[in-house]
Image (cartoon, rainbow, N blue to C red):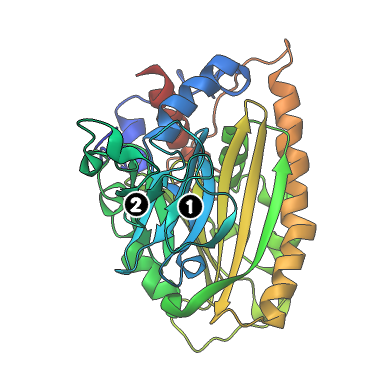
Amino acid sequence: MHHPSRSGEPVTASISRGTASMTDPVRSLAARYYTDPAVFEAEMGGLLSRTWQFACHASALRNGGDYVTFEIAGESLFAIKGRDGVIRTFYNVCQHRAHQLVSGTGTKRLLVCPYHSWTYELTGELRSGPNIGVVEGFDRSKVCLTEVRTEVFLGLVFVNLDPKASPMDDWFPGVQDELRTWVPDWERLQPIRWIEIPESCNWKVSVENYSECYHCSLNHPTFATGVVKAETYDIQPQGYCLRHTTECQNLDDMTYQIDRSRAHAEEYSSWFLWPAFSFQAYPGNVLNTYHWRPLDVDRVVVWRGWYAVDGEESDVILDLARQDRETTVEEDVHLVESVQRGLRSRGYAPGPLVIDPKCGVNSEHSVMHLQRWMREAVDV
């Protein structure tokens, strides 16, 4: 998975090649992909180690020496800003005898291991260690922390444990340019709320639920009648991105006031970046993000971020964040946890996906693409 294929074809092309037909419908993935611990372990060692994963917002690393620790695919990592202004990420392990170097967040002039005081520069090179001079043949220049591929993508820090991974712009073509149009103040945005949402389900169940709006009108009345016009909702692949588009609700019916002066202010758009992150631009050019962190085969934590210019709290954004948590998010938690319970039932057999050649809100063509990526990640 070093270089992504451009599999973002219209659903009609897949159907015309016989991928889906009236006599041979595309069926959902077998339950084992969501319930088998061996599948989860394969994803942790493969898919989640070879794809771009969210680490933190760059504003958490303002000055040289600022660092943030986090975990990806079972690995403890930390991102740190060098005195040269470059953000680097390292495995959180000393190269002497494997003690972890840092925890939480903070600022360091140097990286000093708590075990034996081996000391590293912010760029990862070994600077010193007690009594290492007595070791014959010891070459300090050959000892360095193990670095991880890092990119800053629209003000957010992403990492990839695969040193040969293609750049994010290859994985997600055109996404940065589109986001700059929908979120014109992106360079000044900073998080003002992080909302942690634990879900008792496989991470893919939650991602699939996010990646279709077939269920929205029935299950998300506030979102479907007070934020967007659900009947205009559509999702299309764009490289390894699933691109959500829809119109905002009639202004008289909106649950919050929006500034209509900017381009795309009366639209809702989302860019889901496979496998576990999404940017969303709510009507009014309000940016928020989703990040899925798988914990176990049937546990995931979803981190929801809300952003404002210069990190100044906005009543409109905070009220929208509260409304979202109390309605759409809470409704989704019940849905995905029920699905996870159902996947463990001996009475379940994977049913056909509803794939409309015209796409639209009542079609699961986005789930078809998503499940193809899921299957390929485990089976190939």
Find the residue positioned furthest to the front.
Answer: 134
* Residue drawn at (54%, 47%) of the image: 70
Packing grade of label 1 (10 A; few <14, some 14-19, many >=20) is many
| Quadrant containing the C terminus in the rendered view | top left
| Residue at the image point whose x is 21% and y is 38% from the top | 139
User: What is the crowding at mark 2: few (fewer than 14 residues within 10 Å), some, or many (at least 20)?
Assistant: many
Horizontally, residue 334 falls left or right of residue 377, namely: right
In the picture shown, does residue 183 fall above or below 244?
below
Q: Earlier in the sequence, mark 1 or mark 2?
A: 1
190 over 16 or under it: above or below: below
Please identify the residue farthest to the top as the structure is shown.
346
| Quarter of the figure with residue 322 | bottom right
Q: Which residue is mark 2?
A: 150
Instruction: Say if mark 1 contacts mark 2, CB within 8 Å.
Output: yes
Q: Closest to the observer: 15 or 266?
A: 266
Residue appearing at x 36%, y 35% in the figure: 50
